[in-house]
Image (cartoon, grey):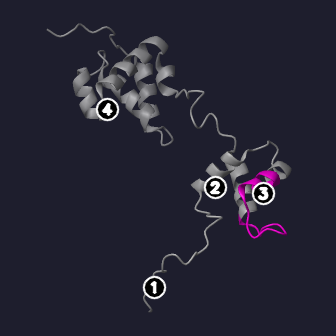
Amino acid sequence: MARPKKYNISLTDEELKELKSVIRKKQTSKTVRSRCQIIIDLDEAHGKILTHEQSAKTNGVCMATITNTVRLYHNEGIGGIVSLKRNINSDNARRKLDGRAEAHLIEIACSPAPEGHSRWTLRLLEAQAKIILDTPVGKNAIGRALKKTNSGLTKTTTGASRQKRMPSS
């Protein structure tokens, strides 16, 4: 015997319109899109009603996602489903460098090394970043920012492995 439903979803016409418009927007994330589609699938007031298992299968998510989405809708309404709340410990919340600061940092790293040095080091970049950027940035943040780009500051051929020969045209 199946457990009775704890939360019943019954959308108004305005709520249904709002969810469909959120799904159609290009800048909507996949998570928000799937949440909206789950709520539309489980709506008892409009059209066919899917079970949680059927909704999970059609949306390509697990059962925990379905139950969490339904609970979120019940507690916070459509606003809770449409907005993504980042945890304060997530990587995006803790970023020290935004895109503009990263661009300045890459520009510095690609410029010629300062006098007396053969190449940029993380400590040199950290000192230069303190001068140019408004906020002080540590060498770990600088290393992570430069790792994402393919600017290998220490990439010099050491001769340990042979270079691939390009076919002549």
Q: What residue type is disc 4 on?
A: Val
- Identify the mark nearer the N-term, 2 or 3: 3
Residue type (three-letter) at the residue carrying disc 2? Leu
Nearer to the camera, 93 or 160: 160
Q: Of the numbered discs in the image, which one, if any, rests on residue 124?
A: 3
Locate residue 38, reporting x and y percent. 34, 26
Residue that numbered label 2 is attached to? 146
Q: Residue furthest left?
A: 1
Q: Is residue 18 left or right of residue 40?
A: right
Helix, strand or loop under label 2: helix
**Which residue in the protein does label 1 denote?**
165
Say what amino acid the circle numbered 3 marks: Leu
Mark 4 neighbour class, 10 Å CA radius: few under 14, some 14 to 19, many 20 or more: some
- The label on residue 61 is 4
The location of residue 147, given as percent across then percent down, is 59, 55
Q: Which residues are magenta?
A: 110-128
